[in-house]
């Protein structure tokens, strides 16, 4: 069993990025195939949650399957998921009313990302007084993420900070730069650099002995610091003592993380070396990010992630699938068949990359089954028709077995105007978070 | 008590308040009468306007209500009270009251100085990077190593909010690894890649400062090459929004230089590239960019890497018609000149060794000739490093710990260097490096003030003036117990201000005080301001930093900050200001002939950070002046205030002035806006990016007139400046408060005001010299002393005169 398929993470493709065939680059694809899968008893199945966002909605008549229930056919966009049909539920007619203007004017791109996972209406402001709602990934992290090193991971592929005109007028960039809010006033920044993510997760990579040696070094430094604190506290005033106590507690928290890491380092997952930086190719970049999320699930470094595959207003072009035009410009298709066809290509392409992630989860044993069995993935956008910026109906699907709570292979068609928040609530309940409401939810969704 | 009485008598005698009859027996005093006549109407026990009553406050025992009186003093000093429209006492009477109050408070402070609270200080990002620079001769980018610091009271070095969290400590520990590897030159380091980007609004039509003559545009980077070895330098050219590389119609020569020496030259553009781009933009891009990479051997150490184009003869069509100064205005344009978008430096590959770097020269003060010399040499190296990092003499116990880490690294890594690296890691992650400890002496009773020792003073001094650790000279003086000698202290202050490290006062202190840090986030609407580009943004920052530094380095009167007849410009900025005969990217000092441009209020940096993307904001400018010049920040707006209507929301277009007048009809808004707005309106002749204009956004002639809070009439920047200069103490007080906040790493409160007045009174004697303010702060009880807190005392509460809207400073 290999953890990362050689095809997906081609060394040559990465080398092309830096152009020097003679140069050996430390890459994720040096992951050794000698992985020992995490073995857990069936009794201790851990639910995981991932939420994946794509911008600019979807061409709905090409997204929505034909037929309902178990008897349906994927359209041209979702055809990328054919192989995983039995692990996918497509949900139609969900909408996010709270992303509508409601008197605030344009800026649907900002409200789309700000509303998607919390069902609340974002406050119109460019200042620091941003306000939206706690998102379900963070509610989940508070419940199922506490025993892992990282309660949650927030990832993206595009850094548009500092760009002219990259945010909606009247709205802080924070709304568009993340889909995750730890509380109504704290947007969580999303990391785009695979190397930074990697170092957070695994330190600097390398072989097991190398990593253990480094952890040992970290440990000895932390021990030394801990040992020195009582001496340093002598002669300090009350407040400073308190601060040093906090410091000591934090050092212990790091030690705890280190110990968790050491346990997994010695026995379970072999680490690749760290990626060099942000790869040039979008496909590589997305692939690396998905690899790390799979690795993080596998090593139980985290159980919750959010991932923005591209940002709203993204002008990324997709020449690799025959769309050299910028995405956002194309998304204002004016019902031009040529532009619509290009959008379908982009949307299908995003799902192709997502399908590879599903491949990987499925190929990774976990407890009595595989990672995909134990994971709930929410995939979708918070715009519908990108030409007119509406939020109804939303392209939405679930993937994964949800640790036995999700039965895939179905297309569920709800009554029109069913709140997307109902699905958010349902997802939370299914992974064991006893919430009663999310945003404007009215009830849970039946049938899911 | 006797002294206070004397003062009253003095006050009466001085200003002749004979009009107020003393007819209330013992409690009656002219101060009381003045308050009763002009203040108590609103500030009564019943009305309590602004939360303040002066009806029954004891004017004979001023120190008993010091906090309240300091607020009164402040309002009276800037002429804000009584408000316009209400009867006012004459200036002499007000002055007498202020003098009386100040004298009472100052006297009380002199007999029982209160240095205020001081919290254990953690090095923030800037201080960490500067300390690493001074300790290891290594420039690091702290934003890649540590999370950002929260800011409070306008500065990000506030000890109370420099907290600790697991993520933060994790980053300190991992930073210690990265820094020590880089400094020592660990030969096992992996290749890494760093991407340098240009901002999308960077114009690249002209030579960049620091590039060779005869070049055009590009990017100049400073990069620490970790080891001797091979590096890949890869160039990405700017594309338009449909992914076509710009400006390749003609051929251009792209050059890469390392430390000024050409290492790469390639031709890009011309017929074949253009044809390829037309055929298949994506493929052509890959083909072209694959040619734009250099694989070059580079020696370890900090080096400049320049990526630029060779300047072509204008006759060869280098310039096409460019109506605007910003060359990248049109996002779909593919004509014009090629621009550098980003540069990636990756490596080392096939590393051959740590080489000879400034860091290694600084660290390895000895080299063991054989194994038997290793421990002795390690001892020498590590005690030098630890002394600098811990900012104190090293004990045998320190050495023992460090040597055990050295030995572990030596054994595991198999080399002397590996041992030093491991021990250096410990030094950099030690709490003694990361925190600034100040210990209460056992002999001092709880609650009593005491003088901090010379070593603690050395650290306070260097972090104040350099944002970094003390150097050997300071430490030597401190160890010898000589630093606290006032003469020595003044000598050291002068030496430190003359040292290049005092640049931190401009880039760290002034950049926060004046909100210059916000410049990088300012992106004006390109439709309204098509000339604004990153070149201008950078120039605006440089101008004000150089201007502030000139006051520091030349030890000028701090009022020059408001009033100087000179500034610093390069060609780009001179064009912006309409100053003739300035050519090239180098900054130089110019004498201003235009009165409006004088001082900070005429500088584009300040005018820009107080504007919004599409227009000026008199409110933001007024608020900025109230906060940063007058020291009386307005309170935060009440909740649920409607924002100023923008013109595009329907209806007949109104000027900003008209819209603000509308806004002021609400009494809740008026109380602050009638103070803020006139200050801002006086600067209306400067547009949102600081350029002079005669007409406003809506085409109407500018009306820059207004009445300030003290009743003085102003019209335009020069009269505003004159009004501010008329009360020099107000500005100097604000600056001193800001400096003190920054120096102490805490909010300044009413208890500090007597000392601030003393500092200013002293500085006023010799033209408010900058070094006199610094010297006054350094010698103040606040800076020199601490109060011993009982080990079980509850946490100290912090309060400030400057509370309110500080959090807007981002």
Image (cartoon, rainbow, N blue to C red):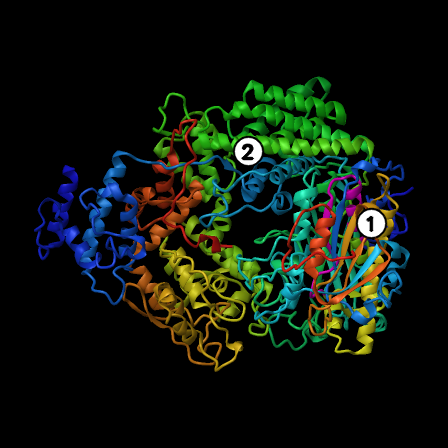
Comparing B93 with A25, the one in front is B93
Q: Is residue B602 above or below residue B385?
A: below
Magenta-highlighted residues: A287-314
**Residue A322 rendering spot, x and y as whole percentages:** 85, 68
Q: Chain of mark 1?
A: A
* Residue name at image x 48 percent, y 64 percent: B604
- From the image, tell me which residue sits under label 2: A246
**Residue B734 rendering spot, x and y as whole percentages:** 36, 52
Image position of B174 (left or right of B75) = right
Magenta stretch contains residue A309: yes
Comparing B589 with A272, the one in front is A272
Comparing A109 with B131, the one in front is A109
- From the image, tell me which residue sits under label 1: A401
Query: Can residue B281 be seen by looking at this rendering?
Result: no
**Residue A140 rendering spot, x and y as whole percentages:** 68, 47
* Residue name at image x 65 percent, y 78 percent: B321
Measure how far apart labels 2 and 1 are at the Cα level: 41 Å
Image quadrant in which the N terminus of chain B is located: top left
Q: Is residue B450 above or below residue B580?
A: above
Crowding around mark 1 (Cα neighbors within 10 Å: few <14, some 14 to 19, many 20+) is many
Residue B227 position by quadrant: top right
Q: Is residue A354 above or below residue A230?
A: below
Local secondary structure at mark 2: helix
Total number of numbered discs in the rendering: 2
**Residue B69 rendering spot, x and y as whole percentages:** 27, 48
Residue B225 position by quadrant: top right
Local secondary structure at mark 1: loop
Label whose residue precedes the other's in the sequence (2 or 1): 2
Q: Chain of mark 2?
A: A
Residue B256 position by quadrant: bottom right
């Amino acid at each position: 069993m290999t953890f990362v398929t050689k095809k997906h993470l081609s060394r040559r493709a990465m080398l092309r990025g830096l152009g020097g065939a003679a140069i050996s680059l430390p890459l994720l694809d040096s992951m050794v195939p000698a992985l020992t899968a995490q073995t857990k008893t069936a009794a201790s199945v851990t639910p995981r949650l991932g939420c994946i966002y794509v911008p600019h909605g979807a061409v709905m008549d090409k997204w929505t399957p034909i037929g309902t229930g178990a008897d349906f056919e994927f359209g041209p966009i979702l055809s990328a998921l054919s192989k995983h049909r039995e692990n996918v539920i497509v949900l139609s007619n969900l909408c996010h009313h709270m992303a509508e203007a409601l008197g605030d004017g344009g800026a649907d791109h900002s409200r789309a990302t700000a509303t998607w996972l919390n069902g609340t209406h974002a406050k119109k402001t460019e200042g620091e007084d941003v306000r939206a709602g706690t998102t379900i990934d963070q509610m989940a992290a508070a419940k199922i993420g506490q025993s892992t090193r990282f309660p949650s991971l927030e990832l993206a592929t595009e850094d548009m900070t500092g760009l002219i005109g990259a945010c909606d007028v009247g709205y802080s960039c924070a709304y568009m730069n993340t889909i995750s809010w730890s509380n109504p006033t704290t947007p969580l920044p999303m990391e785009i650099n695979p190397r930074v993510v990697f170092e957070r997760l695994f330190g600097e990579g390398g072989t097991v002995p190398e990593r253990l040696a480094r952890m040992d070094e970290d440990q000895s430094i932390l021990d030394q610091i801990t040992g020195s604190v009582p001496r340093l506290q002598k002669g300090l005033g009350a407040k400073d003592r308190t601060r040093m106590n906090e410091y000591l507690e934090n050092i212990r928290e790091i030690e705890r993380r280190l110990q968790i890491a050491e346990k997994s380092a010695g026995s379970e997952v072999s680490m690749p070396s760290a990626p060099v930086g942000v790869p040039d190719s979008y496909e590589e970049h997305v692939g690396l990010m998905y690899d790390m999320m799979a690795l993080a699930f596998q090593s139980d470094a985290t159980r919750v992630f959010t991932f923005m595959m591209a940002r709203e207003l993204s002008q990324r072009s997709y020449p690799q699938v025959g769309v050299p035009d910028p995405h956002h410009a194309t998304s204002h298709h004016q019902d031009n068949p040529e532009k619509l066809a290009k959008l379908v290509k982009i949307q299908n392409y995003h799902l192709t990359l997502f399908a590879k992630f599903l491949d990987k989860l499925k190929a990774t044993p976990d407890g009595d089954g595989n990672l995909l069995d134990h994971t709930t993935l929410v995939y979708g956008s918070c715009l519908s028709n990108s030409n007119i910026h509406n939020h109804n109906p939303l392209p939405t699907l679930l993937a994964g077995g949800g640790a036995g709570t999700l039965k895939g292979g179905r297309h569920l068609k709800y009554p029109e105007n069913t709140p997307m928040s109902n699905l958010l609530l349902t997802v939370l309940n299914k992974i064991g978070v006893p919430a009663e409401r999310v945003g404007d939810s009215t009830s849970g969704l039946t049938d899911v | 008590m006797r002294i206070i009485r004397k003062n009253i008598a003095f006050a009466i005698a001085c200003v002749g308040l004979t009009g107020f009859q003393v007819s209330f027996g013992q409690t009656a005093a002219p101060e009381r009468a003045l308050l009763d006549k002009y203040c108590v109407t609103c500030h009564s026990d019943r009305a309590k306007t602004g939360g303040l009553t002066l009806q029954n406050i004891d004017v004979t025992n001023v120190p008993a209500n010091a906090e309240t009186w300091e607020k009164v003093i402040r309002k009276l000093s800037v002429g804000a009270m009584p408000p316009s429209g209400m009867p006012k006492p004459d200036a002499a009477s007000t002055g007498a009251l202020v003098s009386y109050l100040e004298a009472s408070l100052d006297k009380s402070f002199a007999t029982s100085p209160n240095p205020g609270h001081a919290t254990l200080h953690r090095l923030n990002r800037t201080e960490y990077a500067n300390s690493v620079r001074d300790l290891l001769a290594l420039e690091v980018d702290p934003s890649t190593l540590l999370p950002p610091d929260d800011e409070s009271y306008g500065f990000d070095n506030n000890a109370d909010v420099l907290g600790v969290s697991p993520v933060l400590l994790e980053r300190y520990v991992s930073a210690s690894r990265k820094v020590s590897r880089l400094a020592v030159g660990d030969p096992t380091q992996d290749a890494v890649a760093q991407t340098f980007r240009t901002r999308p609004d960077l114009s690249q039509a002209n030579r960049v400062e620091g590039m060779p003559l005869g070049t055009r545009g590009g990017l100049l980077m400073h990069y620490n090459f970790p080891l001797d070895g091979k590096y890949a330098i890869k160039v990405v050219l700017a594309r338009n929004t449909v992914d076509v590389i710009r400006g390749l119609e003609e051929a251009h020569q792209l050059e890469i230089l390392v430390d000024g020496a050409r290492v790469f030259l390639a031709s890009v553009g011309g017929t074949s590239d253009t044809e390829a781009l037309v055929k298949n933009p994506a493929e052509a891009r890959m083909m072209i960019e694959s040619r734009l990479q250099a694989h070059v051997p580079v020696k370890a150490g900090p080096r400049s890497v320049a990526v630029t184009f060779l300047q072509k003869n204008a006759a060869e069509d280098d310039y096409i018609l460019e109506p605007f100064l910003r060359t990248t205005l049109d996002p779909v344009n593919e004509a014009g000149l090629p621009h550098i978008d980003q540069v990636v430096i990756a490596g080392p590959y096939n590393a051959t060794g740590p080489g000879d770097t400034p860091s290694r020269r600084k660290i390895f003060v000895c080299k063991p000739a054989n194994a038997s010399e290793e421990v002795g040499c390690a001892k020498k190296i590590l005690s030098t490093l630890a002394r600098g990092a811990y900012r104190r003499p090293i004990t045998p116990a320190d050495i023992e710990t460090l040597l055990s880490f050295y030995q572990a690294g030596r054994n595991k890594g198999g080399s002397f260097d590996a041992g030093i690296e491991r021990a250096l890691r410990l030094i950099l992650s030690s709490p003694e490096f990361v925190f600034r400890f100040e210990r209460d002496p056992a002999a001092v009773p709880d609650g009593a003030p005491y003088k901090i020792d010379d070593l603690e003073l050395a650290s306070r001094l260097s972090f104040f003036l350099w944002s970094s650790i003390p150097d050997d000279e300071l430490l030597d003086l401190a160890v010898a117990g000589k630093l606290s000698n006032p003469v020595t202290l003044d000598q050291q202050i002068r030496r430190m201000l003359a040292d290049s490290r005092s640049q931190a006062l401009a880039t760290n202190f002034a950049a926060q005080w004046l909100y210059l840090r916000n410049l990088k986030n300012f992106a004006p609407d390109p439709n309204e301001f098509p000339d604004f580009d990153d070149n201008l943004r950078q120039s605006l920052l440089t101008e004000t930093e150089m201007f502030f530094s000139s006051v520091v380095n030349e030890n000028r009167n701090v009022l020059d900050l408001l009033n100087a007849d000179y500034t610093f410009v390069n060609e780009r900025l001179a064009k912006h200001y309409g100053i003739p005969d300035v050519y090239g990217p180098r900054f130089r000092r110019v004498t201003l002939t235009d009165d409006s441009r004088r001082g900070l209020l005429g500088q584009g940096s300040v005018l820009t950070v107080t504007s919004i993307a599409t227009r000026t904001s008199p409110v933001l400018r007024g608020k900025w002046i109230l906060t940063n010049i007058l020291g009386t920040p307005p309170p935060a707006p009440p909740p649920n205030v409607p924002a100023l209507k923008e013109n595009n929301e329907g209806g007949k277009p109104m000027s900003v002035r008209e819209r603000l007048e509308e806004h002021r009809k609400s009494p809740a808004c008026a109380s602050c806006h009638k103070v803020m707005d006139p200050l801002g309106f006086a600067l209306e002749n400067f547009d949102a990016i600081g350029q002079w204009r005669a007409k406003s956004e809506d085409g109407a002639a500018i009306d820059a007139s207004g009445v300030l809070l003290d009743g003085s009439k102003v019209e335009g920047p020069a009269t505003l400046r004159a009004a501010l200069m008329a009360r020099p103490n107000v500005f100097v007080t604000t600056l001193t408060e800001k400096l003190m906040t920054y120096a102490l790493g805490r909010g300044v409160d009413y208890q500090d005001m007597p000392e601030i007045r003393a500092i200013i009174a002293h500085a006023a004697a010799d033209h408010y010299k900058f070094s006199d303010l610094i010297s006054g702060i350094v010698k103040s009880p606040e800076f020199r002393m601490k109060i011993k807190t009982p080990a079980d005392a509850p946490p100290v509460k912090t309060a400030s005169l400057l509370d309110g809207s500080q959090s807007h400073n981002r």
